[in-house]
Image (cartoon, grey):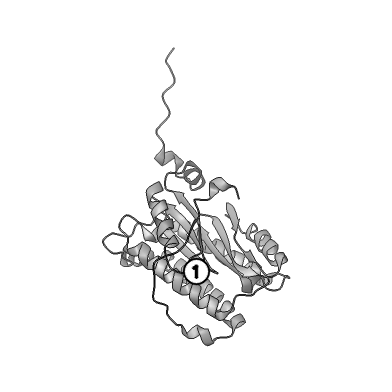
Amino acid sequence: MSNASRSRFYSNAKNPITQQFYLHLFVPHAYYACMKKNISLFASASLIMFSLTGCLGAIIGGVGSVGQAAVEERSIGTNIDDRTISAAINRYFMQSEVPGVFKDVQIRVHEGRVLLLGKTNNQQIAMEAVRLAWLAGGVREVMNEIQIGSETTGLWDYSKDNVIESQIETRLIATKGIHSSNYTVEVVNGVAYLLGVAQDAKERHNAAYIASVTRGVNKVVSYVRLKNDPIRLNATGKMSGEQPAPPAPPAY
């Protein structure tokens, strides 16, 4: 992944937040990881069903933000495609002969861009995850952010990451000028990852800044693209609608 595909990193969190405790602190580590992945799969299937029955618009409209209407840049069709890609990759992970891929790696998809997250002590797991992600139809880009380390992520670490993630999402929703419905936020070991679409460079900067000043965040990695980015418009088939018509050829 080139430096141009990423936005600026932000660090040095300052603002305090109230830590919370979750029941899953008492769930064994391996079971919790699988449970989280299964919930994600169930949510994907549910969203596809709601979309096909025409309920997605009501859901999106019902998820309001403070002082602003929710604006979803992804079409219903693209949203379904992303969920389908995620489900396909999860299926490949479950069928993989490399132990730990399904348990250790999380998947987030936005407009065909696949973000792989998680932490493992096995480099082979990360390599297998990238390989399998490219097998799914409709994948345009795979961003490997799987952390490799000797220390495994414990239940307390999971809990802290979830608290930080919730705080960032809440702040994005409450901030004027940020269309929070276009952002996906994930936190792994204090590193906040942002994926989605911003209306302009200012919004993208503000979203990353909000994440960076949330207590517990050590670094922010932004994969947020601008709404009118030519690469995005071309990939999503919106180029013709956003660009002016070419001039007519001269008459002879």
Q: Viewer-proximal residue, 25 or 134?
A: 25
Mark 1, residue position: 44
Q: Residue furthest top?
A: 252
> In the displayed structure, would residue 39 be above or below residue 214?
below
The x, y position of residue 167, in whole percent, is 40, 69
Report the side of 240 relative to 32 (left or right).
left
Q: Residue at x 59, y 65 (%)?
A: 88
Q: Residue at x 69, y 63 (%)?
A: 128
The x, y position of residue 59, in whole percent, is 35, 67
* Any part of residue 118 in sight: yes
The x, y position of residue 28, in whole percent, is 59, 85
Report the side of 150 relative to 235 (left or right).
right
Q: Viewer-proximal residue, 86 or 16?
A: 16
Q: Residue at x 51, y 67 (%)?
A: 187
* Any part of residue 55 in sight: no
| Element at label 1 | helix
The x, y position of residue 16, in whole percent, is 39, 70
